[in-house]
Image: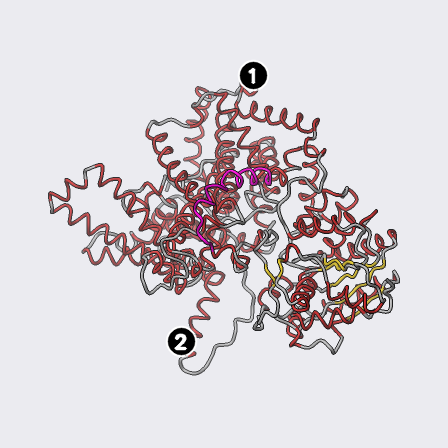
């Protein structure tokens, strides 16, 4: 069941009504049933997987908390079982193909897997939540005593498929005391859900038309076209994923739960480390707390810190998918973070560099540079293969060895007949970037949409709903992060 | 070790204090004044106004704004045919491509797919056979990705009155019954377009089998904007294109995305859309065999029994409709390569063949199994399913000599 589908439009109000109309002590059970209905509406059998993993981690959590010895062993076992499940579903084909290519050098081949493995929705996200739970309990946090509470933490439908990755210490206390649905809360929920749908239906899905065309056949486009397509993907993935998060947060709020924010205007980041503090925040903080710091973090030599950074980012890349281009994307992000740290170190020793860094011009230059560095990374993230990514990179850099069918400086994408989005692409991208700046100003003044005059809010709500109705597709396109 | 339950208690008391002080329950008046409530009321008023005036319902369905799909182009051309062409071909791209490719070679000319909905070759063979010199036309209404339900909608929406043909030749394959890429029959582009010409109330259970699909449809009946969203989308898009046309023309860069290759790049949900100049059929076009097995494995790899039953239901309806309108229906099982048939799930091809044979036999329709015909060999195909002009010519020769045709 997708957030942008008609089914969800019916499901959410029904669950919200049932939840609040039920006696307080029954509410967690109502919600738990709704969560499993939501998850099993896709493939019922995977409800068992979710339940099995929940039971396993619940029991392991209690055992770790009670044990006086072998606690580390039990925690390791729980992590191995969680990661093993993830690896089986997500990386089995990849590992088999990799092993086959190695064995193939000896002149033999491995037999096919013989089973068809379908990746369970959201497994990457709930496995990370389980690992966080057992590690925190091992470190001394209190385990969750009630099984239903723990099951609800694992299966909470607004965040089940693509996060944000929750922390149980924040979530579980809310289960028996959800915030009552006051008018202010309902208004905020509506605002978040409408904003999410607006981002997904009007921006992300339209930009996907351009992105799909360009990344399928980059050889047919000029360098300028490909720059536009890469910018388009940068905004597509941002709007797609942040739309999901907005709808998740709005839906959770209607049920009285607060879930963490995942984005904070990432394309206005002034450095790559700033970008990772603003992009997919729940994943980057998870990687920091449960991978980078356990590896030793930055408590050691520079080389040791950089090694940890590289490992964290490469594994973060592979978490997105079992393909070499995701690993390269992760390694690229790691290298950018290392370069950023080196630059910071250097500028501390050079006064003139420090002075330059404090100027406004440098600040804006940093934003533009960071955005473009991130865009380069997106090429590896989105490309179908490494060869495809390399061709796009060569064209983006106007390298002569990249064969150009068209003059590299010409703009041909705008002349496409099929869809209006091609025609308005440059203006649309400029507006989207301007929208980010406006949102920053809004945030700086500590104001929000809910403080603008009521009549303006009323008209905006009506117009937005009208547009959403008119442009809603007959069947909902998936969110990008559903595949992870 | 502190337990979570203790934390809950302390948080609960803090929250209830906070709620009591700051978040008092809103009164009905406050709720009524909320921008959400007012926004929804505004929307309902607009809907009521549109529902009463029904502005788009007063427009002829043929000129009502529509996306330029393959169905739209074919419908426009078909409705201009007066009197109706005596022979109409219905089916999917298997039929469409074979007929069009043969025509391009036969006429020795390139033509735009969106403007050539005929089989001149078949028409000429029929004229030869029946000694007619008048303008006998064979209309090719086969559409890419067509399902049986779409064929039925073409017949139901258009084949009556002065637009009623004498013969309908329906080319079928298993894909037309089980396409896994299709969500439900009621949301395909041909179905969505053609439903404006006819009332589909009696088809709801077949065309929209899931409860939420039916609820979606019912919502459209009471919510005007929801019902007319496709038309409104087109209105907005056309206005935007008109506004932007001078800007685009001033750029004037020749775009490779405008040519036939562009079809490969658009996402599948836009494959049904086509404009002039985007799909040109070239005469004597050389080709190399395209092993498109992956595509067919995706679309026909699983038996999709629910969809099969529904499409068989539509085939029965089509047979009944033709009987009722006194149209002779000829059903063909289209030729495929052996490799393509091998992809089909175990037993499903045989089940399909039995089903269409039974429906034909039970209703005294002419049925021909061209897939069992040894005249069709692998060289007659340009991929695992679609015939080239040589295959098209063989098939049209078979059709031209059918005993049941009397023109």
Looking at the image, the residue that sits furthest to the top is B29
Report whether residue A67 is seen.
Answer: no
Chain letter of mark 2 equals A
The answer to which image quadrant residue B224 occupies is: top right
SS at mark 1 in the image: helix
Q: Is residue A163 left or right of residue A307?
A: right
* A376 is within the stretch colored magenta: no
**Residue in the image at 38% along x and 40% along y:** A433
Q: Classify B347 as above or below B232.
A: below
Looking at the image, the residue that sits furthest to the front is B133
* B246 is within the stretch colored magenta: yes
Q: Classify A398 as above or below B234.
A: below
The residue under label 1 is B29
**Residue in the image at 68% along x and 50% along y:** B190
**Residue in the image at 19% along x and 41% along y:** A357
Q: Is residue B298 left or right of residue A351?
A: right
Report whether residue A189 is seen.
Answer: yes
Residue A298 - label: none
Query: Which sits in the foreground, B235 or A483?
Result: B235
Chain letter of mark 1 equals B
Q: Tag 1: Cα neighbours inside 10 Å, few (<14), some, or many (≥20)? A: few
Q: In this view, does B244 lie to the left or right of A6?
A: left
Colouring mode (rainbow / by chain / secondary structure / one colour): secondary structure
Instruction: Give the image location of residue A244, x and y in percent.
Output: 48, 43
Residue A102 - label: 2
SS at mark 2 in the image: helix
Magenta stretch bounds:
B233-255
Instruction: Give the image location of residue B235, x and y in percent.
Output: 59, 38
Query: Which sits in the foreground, A305 or B222?
Result: B222
């Amino acid at each position: 069941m997708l957030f942008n589908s008609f089914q969800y439009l019916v499901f959410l109000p029904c669950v919200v009504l049932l939840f609040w109309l039920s006696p307080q002590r029954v509410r967690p059970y109502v919600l738990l049933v709704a969560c499993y209905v939501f998850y099993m509406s896709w493939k019922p059998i995977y409800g068992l997987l979710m339940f099995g993993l929940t039971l396993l981690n619940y029991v392991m959590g209690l055992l770790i908390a009670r044990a006086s010895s072998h606690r580390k062993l039990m925690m390791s076992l729980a992590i191995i079982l969680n990661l093993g499940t993830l690896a089986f579903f997500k990386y089995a084909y990849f590992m088999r193909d990799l092993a086959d290519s190695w064995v193939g050098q000896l002149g033999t081949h491995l037999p096919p897997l013989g089973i068809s493995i379908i990746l369970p929705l959201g497994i990457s996200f709930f496995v990370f939540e389980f690992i966080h739970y057992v590690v925190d309990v091992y470190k001394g946090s209190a385990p969750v005593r009630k099984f239903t509470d723990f099951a609800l933490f694992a299966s909470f439908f607004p965040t089940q498929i693509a996060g944000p990755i929750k922390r149980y210490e924040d979530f579980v206390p809310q289960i028996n005391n959800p915030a009552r649905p006051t008018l202010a809360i309902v208004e905020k929920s509506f605002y978040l859900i409408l904003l999410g749908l607006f981002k997904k239906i009007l921006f992300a899905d339209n930009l996907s038309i351009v992105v799909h065309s360009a990344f399928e056949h980059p050889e047919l486009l000029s360098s300028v076209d490909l720059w536009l397509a890469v910018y388009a993907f940068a905004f597509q993935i941002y709007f797609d994923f942040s739309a999901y998060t907005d709808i998740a947060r709005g839906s959770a709020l209607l049920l009285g739960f607060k879930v963490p924010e995942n984005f904070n205007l990432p394309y206005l980041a002034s450095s790559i480390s700033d970008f990772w503090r603003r992009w997919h925040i729940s994943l980057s903080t998870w990687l920091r707390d449960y991978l980078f710091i356990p590896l030793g973090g930055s408590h050691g030599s520079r080389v040791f810190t950089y090694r940890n950074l590289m490992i964290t980012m490469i594994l973060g890349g592979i978490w997105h998918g079992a393909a070499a281009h995701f690993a390269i994307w992760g390694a690229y992000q790691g290298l950018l973070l290392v370069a950023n740290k080196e630059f910071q170190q250097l500028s501390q020793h050079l006064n003139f560099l420090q002075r330059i860094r404090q100027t406004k011009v440098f600040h804006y230059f940093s934003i533009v540079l960071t955005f473009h560095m991130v865009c380069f990374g997106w090429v590896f993230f989105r490309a179908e293969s490494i060869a495809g990514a390399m061709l796009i990179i060569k064209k983006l850099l106007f390298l002569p060895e990249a064969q150009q069918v068209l003059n590299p400086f010409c703009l041909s994408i705008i002349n496409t007949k099929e869809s209006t989005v091609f025609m308005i692409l440059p203006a649309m991208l400029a507006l989207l970037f301007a929208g980010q700046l406006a949102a920053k100003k809004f945030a700086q003044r500590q104001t929000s949409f809910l403080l603008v005059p009521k009549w303006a809010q009323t008209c905006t709500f009506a117009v937005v709903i009208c547009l959403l109705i008119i442009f809603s597709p007959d069947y909902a396109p998936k969110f990008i992060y559903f595949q992870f | 070790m502190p337990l979570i339950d203790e934390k809950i208690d302390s948080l609960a008391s803090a929250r209830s204090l906070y709620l009591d002080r700051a978040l008092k329950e809103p009164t009905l008046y406050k709720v009524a004044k909320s921008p959400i409530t007012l926004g929804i009321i505004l929307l309902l008023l607009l809907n009521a106004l549109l529902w009463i005036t029904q502005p788009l319902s007063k427009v002829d369905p043929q000129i009502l704004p529509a996306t330029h799909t393959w169905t739209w182009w074919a419908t426009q051309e078909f409705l201009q045919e007066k009197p109706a062409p005596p022979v109409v071909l219905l089916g999917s791209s298997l039929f469409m491509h074979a007929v069009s490719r043969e025509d391009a070679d036969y006429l020795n000319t390139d033509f735009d797919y969106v403007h050539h909905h005929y089989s001149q070759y078949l028409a000429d063979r029929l004229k030869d056979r029946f000694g007619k010199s008048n303008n006998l036309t064979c209309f090719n209404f086969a559409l890419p990705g067509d399902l049986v339900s779409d064929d039925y909608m073409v017949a139901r929406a258009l084949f009556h009155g002065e637009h009623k043909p004498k013969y309908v030749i329906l080319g079928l394959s298993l894909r037309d019954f089980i396409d896994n890429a299709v969500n439900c029959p009621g949301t395909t582009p041909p179905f969505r377009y053609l439903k404006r010409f006819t009332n589909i109330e009696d088809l709801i259970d077949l065309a929209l089998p899931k409860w939420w699909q039916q609820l979606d449809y019912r919502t459209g009946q009471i919510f005007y904007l929801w019902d007319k969203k496709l038309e409104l989308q087109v209105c907005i898009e056309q206005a935007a294109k008109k506004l932007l046309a001078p800007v685009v023309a001033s750029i004037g860069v020749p775009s490779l995305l405008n040519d036939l290759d562009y079809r490969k790049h658009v996402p599948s949900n836009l494959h049904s859309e086509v404009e002039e100049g985007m799909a040109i059929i070239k005469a004597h076009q050389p080709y190399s065999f395209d092993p498109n097995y992956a595509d067919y494995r995706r679309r026909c790899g699983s038996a999709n029994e629910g969809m099969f039953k529904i499409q068989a239901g539509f085939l029965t309806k089509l047979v009944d409709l033709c009987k009722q309108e006194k149209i002779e229906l000829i059903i063909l099982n289209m030729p495929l390569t052996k490799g393509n048939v091998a992809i089909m799930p175990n037993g499903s091809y045989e089940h399909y063949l039995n089903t269409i044979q039974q429906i034909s036999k039970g209703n005294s329709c002419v049925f021909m199994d061209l897939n069992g015909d040894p005249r069709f060999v692998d060289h007659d195909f340009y991929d695992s399913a679609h015939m080239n002009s040589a295959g098209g010519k063989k098939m049209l020769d078979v059709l031209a000599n059918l005993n049941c045709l009397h023109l």
